[in-house]
């Protein structure tokens, strides 16, 4: 049972006792893209006992350059990332529990996903979800690790509620307006950077799981790989912080379903929050109108009005090339129905 971990057990700070601690640890990875695939790969090979991966998306060709668990077959089959990752990871380590969940992390679902977990690793690409993770983490007293990557510069920050040393809202008062920041659509991202950021996140997770809480990084780590800049930037707690001081969690309490723009894909997601869609029934209805469809166990896809539409079982639809939210909503209403 310990043989596969021999090399890390030989490292003095791990040993057999450390390995046992890792095997008792439970982690939630939010997002299974450039960061999430690398973090999941590391934690699975380390032998973290229970790994839950939540991702709302499916694999596309433009993902392969940096999302290390996917291949061309996953693209051809429109495999959901969480399931493609789960399949590959379980082949790497069959001794641990790996749960790939094809769901969206939002204010209505996050409390279910964090249940029973010891740590949350942020592998998303947007601040809306990060502010939500921050609220949930502080409300339920769970540490979380923030990671961000764009171009060749990236950031990592660990937040531990118990330490009472501040949270994401202390660092950034509110999520930047959509469109205000460059994204991986406009600025691109280099795969060496996403690898470094995700490895730093995994490394902080390792220290936390081993119980070296004092040695977990306290500062914001900023890096630019083009000129090899690495800086540690201390962060200050805001004594009036609505989240970590006043304990009000407005991102978690806002339960409205909505349309969201998905970075990197020219896509809009519509989420009606109705679970258990009958994909077979929708498929029949569309085909009776001579619309060609494809279905796998997780999603149904078709094309209409030059928009590529994928519907998931949990009621979400991702519409690629829809001009704006209104167009996306009207196509959803017309072909899928409210
Ligand atoms: Zn705070």
Image (tube, rainbow, N blue to C red):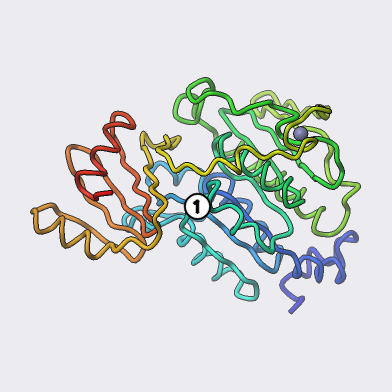
Which residue of the protein is positioned furthest toward the bottom in this rendering?
Answer: 1
Residue 158: image quadrant is top right
Q: Position of residue 232 (x, y in %)?
A: 81, 29
Q: Is residue 186 left or right of residue 321?
A: right
Q: Is residue 35 left or right of residue 243?
A: left
Count neighbours of disc 1 (C-alpha within 10 A) and say few if under 14, some if 14 to 19, many if 20 or more.
many
Residue at the image point whose x is 81% and y is 71% from the top: 20
Q: Position of residue 5 (x, y in %)?
A: 75, 69
Between 241 and 292, the one nearer to me in the picture: 241
Tally of numbered tags:
1
Q: Position of residue 93 (x, y in %)?
A: 61, 70
Q: Is residue 300 left or right of residue 170?
A: left
Residue 138: image quadrant is top right
Vertical order, 95 against 26 (above or below): below
Q: Quadrant of ligand 1?
A: top right
Between 283 and 191, the one nearer to me in the picture: 283
Vertical order, 176 against 210 (above or below): above
In which quadrant is the N terminus drawn? Answer: bottom right
Q: Which residue corresponds to mark 1?
A: 55
Q: Position of residue 283 (x, y in %)?
A: 20, 60
In the structure shown, which secondary structural element does the residue marked by tag 1 occupy? Answer: strand
Vertical order, 178 against 303 (above or below): above
Which residue of the protein is positioned furthest toward the top in this rendering?
Answer: 180
Residue at the image point whose x is 31% and y is 41% from the top: 319
Residue at the image point whose x is 64% and y is 25% from the top: 226
Residue at the image point whose x is 40% and y is 38% from the top: 259
Between 237 and 26, the one nearer to me in the picture: 237
């Amino acid at each position: 049972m310990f043989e596969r971990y021999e090399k890390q057990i030989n490292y003095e700070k791990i040993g057999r006792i450390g390995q046992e601690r890792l095997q008792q640890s439970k982690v939630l990875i939010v997002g299974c893209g450039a960061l999430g695939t690398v973090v999941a790969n590391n934690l699975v090979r380390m032998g973290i006992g229970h790994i839950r991966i939540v991702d709302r998306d499916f694999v596309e060709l433009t993902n392969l350059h940096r999302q290390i668990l996917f291949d061309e077959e996953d693209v051809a089959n429109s495999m959901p990332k969480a399931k493609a990752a789960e399949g590959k990871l379980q082949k790497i380590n069959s001794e641990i529990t790996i749960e790939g969940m094809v769901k969206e992390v939002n204010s209505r679902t996050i409390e279910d996903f964090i249940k029973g977990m010891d740590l949350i690793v942020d592998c998303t690409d947007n601040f809306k979800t990060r502010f939500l993770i921050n609220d949930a983490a502080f409300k339920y007293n769970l540490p979380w690790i923030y990671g961000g990557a764009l171009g060749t510069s990236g950031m990592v920050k660990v937040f531990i509620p118990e330490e009472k040393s501040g949270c994401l809202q202390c660092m950034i008062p509110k999520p930047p307006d959509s469109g205000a920041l460059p994204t991986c659509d406009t600025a691109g991202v280099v795969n060496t950077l996403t690898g470094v950021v995700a490895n730093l996140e995994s490394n902080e997770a390792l220290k936390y799981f081993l119980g070296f809480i004092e040695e977990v990084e306290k500062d914001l780590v900023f890096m630019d790989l083009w000129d090899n800049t690495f800086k540690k930037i201390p962060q200050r707690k805001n004594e009036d912080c609505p989240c970590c001081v006043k304990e009000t969690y407005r991102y978690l309490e806002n339960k409205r379903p909505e349309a969201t723009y998905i970075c990197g894909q020219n896509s809009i997601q519509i989420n009606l929050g109705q679970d258990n869609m009958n994909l077979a029934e929708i498929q029949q209805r569309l085909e009776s109108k001579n619309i060609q469809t494809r279905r796998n166990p997780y999603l149904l896809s078709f094309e209409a009005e030059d928009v590529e539409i994928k519907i998931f079982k949990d009621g979400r639809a991702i519409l690629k090339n829809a001009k704006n939210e209104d167009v996306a909503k009207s196509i959803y209403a017309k072909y899928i129905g409210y």
